[in-house]
Image (cartoon, grey):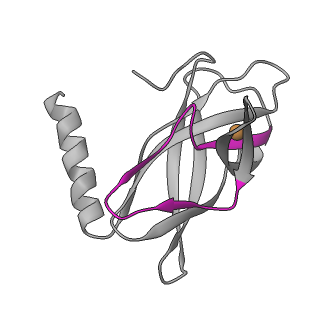
Amino acid sequence: MTRAILGVVLLAAAAAAQGQIEARAAWVRGTVQGQTTAGAYIQLISGQRASLVGAESPAAGSAEIHELKMEGNVMRMRAVPRLELPPGKTVELKPGGHHMMLVDLKRALKKGDLVPIRLKVELSDKTIKTIQVLAEVRELAATGRQ
Ligand SMILES: [Cu+2]
């Protein structure tokens, strides 16, 4: 791990220790012409009990939280209303797991584009905190590993 990355990790850990919520490493999978949905991926770490309860983006008609589940021997995804963020634990929205889906895309997403996403996180006192992230578009075949 390089010193710069370690510094970012330590900063995030410090913020989480103060009860804050950090969102990092946000990216969106690029699309081809005519494609209307795109997976969005992000790491979340909360210093307090909280839940991701929604998101929105100016690039899409809506944004959904999806889970992947085996049904028989077919992997299917479906929208879920919320995703728990246990205190101090990094929750990763990633390919092959929970992810975010941008639905009704307004245009194709090209590698290198930046997509603003506003995350809605419900805190234990039921207040909603919004977190603005800029997700970088990666190529269609990206795996999430760098
Ligand atoms: Cu999905």
Left or right of 84 in this view: 62:
right
Left or right of 113 in this view: 7:
left
Q: Picture coordinates of residue 122 (x, y %)?
A: 54, 71
How many tags in the picture?
0
- Which of the 4 image quarters holds residue 116? top right
Q: Could you tell me which residue is drawn at 49 percent across and 84 percent down?
A: 125
Q: Residue furthest left?
A: 3
Relative to 18, residue 28 above or below: above
Q: Could you tell me which residue is drawn at 26 percent across and 69 percent down?
A: 18
Can you see residue 1?
yes
Q: Could you tell me which residue is drawn at 50 percent across and 48 percent down?
A: 133
- Which of the 4 image quarters holds residue 101? top right
Q: Picture coordinates of residue 83 (x, y %)?
A: 57, 58
Relative to 60, residue 85 above or below: below
Q: Tell me the quarter of the image containing the N terminus.
A: top left
Q: Which residues are magenta?
A: 80-105
Can you see residue 63?
no
Q: Picture coordinates of residue 62 (x, y %)?
A: 76, 50
Q: Could you tell me which residue is drawn at 24 percent across and 43 percent down?
A: 8
Q: Residue furthest bottom?
A: 125
Q: 66 and 35: which one is in front? A: 66
Quarter for ligand 1? top right
Q: Tell me the quarter of the image containing the C terminus.
A: top left
- Which of the 4 image quarters holds residue 114? top right
Q: Residue furthest right?
A: 34
